[in-house]
Amino acid sequence: MFNKCKDKRKADAATKLPLHFMPDFHEINVQLILLACLALVFIFQLLIYFGSFGKLAFYKETIKPAQSPPPPVSIIVCARNEGDNLTEFLPKILSQDYPAFEVIVVNDCSYDNTEDVLREYKEIFTNLKAINVKEDDYYKHGKKFALMVGIKGASYEHLLLTDADCKPDSDLWISAMMSGYEPGKEIVLGYGPYLKEKTFLNRLIRYDTFLIALQYLSLALKNKAYMGVGRNLSYRKELFFKHKGFAGHYHLQSGDDDLFINEASTGSNTAVVLSKDSFTHSVPAKKFKEWRDQKLRHITTAPLYKPSTKRILGWYYSVNYLFHGLVIAGLCFKDTATLAGGIWFLKIVVQLIVFNKVMKKLDEKDLLPFVFIFDLTLLFFYPILQLSRKFVKPNKWKS
């Protein structure tokens, strides 16, 4: 009995000993967990900005010797009711300073003066080829059909794509884009921004375009190309037929640029050209509804991206939304508000440093003062856009 009591006293004493090697869980509260999560997500943000976007921000394009002789090029433009834009912009394409090229304009069922404009320009420019596609009551089609018609009618192996409402920034546009074709390259990605106007909508559209370019150009430089834009894109004709054109996504209105590149790019076969001579500027939407409809058409392609692409893009957006959600939560507590605000400020500083460098390269420097307000605007707009897919049917393509 005595031994049992002695053992019990020892056990009781042992339980009263301070366990310095164990944390005091009473001190771990919601605020501490919140700050830890915010700090971790902030590190993920830094990895995205410097590890991914930094590829583009700190990229130095080397001047490559021109191919001798430079390859002949087929420029393809699809147009539906684009008579006014063709009148203004087509001569800038037809008068490029390049030894051998043709311009194929596919007039896709236009009922304006497009056909008359093309007829007049054919009398002036011998390198213009016009293909007229007539409306068929039994067979409805979109831009992809018109583009396939143009590609099949192309005389040359190197294809350069743009839209009827686009204008090259330089008469060296073809030369600049073709400079990306080194041995092993089959795709060249260019930048296609929108014309600048001093309106909130115009700046918002251009900022959204900049963000998209920031993602796809950065990943292309990391040999993970997943899309291009049809306003300024080049690839080989052989590559197009090797992948059976748009067969895998012909039923979608969009995807002639991003889904095809997502399928055909191997990473190592894709080049990026960033010289200002390579840019093309397009006419932006004038009304919010018009831009929204454009965005709705484009987001229908995302579910068909490669799983690896969807993981990367999902990671980008998830980290961004999680970070802002944690910042807002941190600002709601008195004990964490200062630290949460400080981390948010650091994130903005890092973002501005990276964006400043990229905007200089892409000639979008005037957007830098609006980064904060546009970020918040798009944070709300993107989820609403995804939800509206169920209620709004996007319009058919125009150009």
Image (cartoon, grey):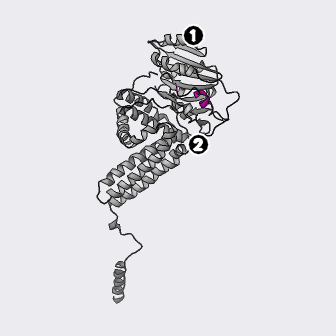
Identify the residue under disc 1: 123
Identified at 38% across, 43% down, the residue is 372
In the current view of this chain or complex, which residue is farthest to the right?
Answer: 68
Part of the protein shown in magenta = 168-178
Above or below residue 136? Residue 160 is below
Image point (41%, 56%), residue name: 39
Judge left or right: residue 184 versus residue 255. right
Residue at mark 1 to residue at mark 2: CA–CA distance? 43 Å
Q: Quadrant of residue 26?
A: bottom left
Q: Is residue 188 above or below residue 21?
A: above
| Left or right of 395 in this view: 91 | right
Q: Name the kind of residue labelled 2 in the image.
A: Lys
- Label 1 crowd (10 A; few <14 / some 14-19 / many >=20): few
Q: Number of numbered discs present? A: 2
Q: How dense is the environment of label 2, judged by Cα within 10 Å: few (below 14), some, or many (20 and up)?
A: few
Write the residue at 35% across / 85% down: 4
- Residue 58 position in % (x across, y down): 55, 45
Callout 1 touching callout 2 (CB < 8 Å) = no
Q: Where is residue 355 in the image (x, y as percent from the top left)?
A: 47, 43
Specify the amino acid type for callout 1.
Glu
Q: Is residue 247 above or below residue 384?
A: above
Q: Is mark 1 on a helix, strand or loop?
A: helix
Q: Residue at x 42, y 45 (%)?
A: 318
Q: Quadrant of the N terminus?
A: bottom left
Measured as percent of width and height from the top left, residue 304 is found at 48, 34
Residue corresponding to mark 2:
60
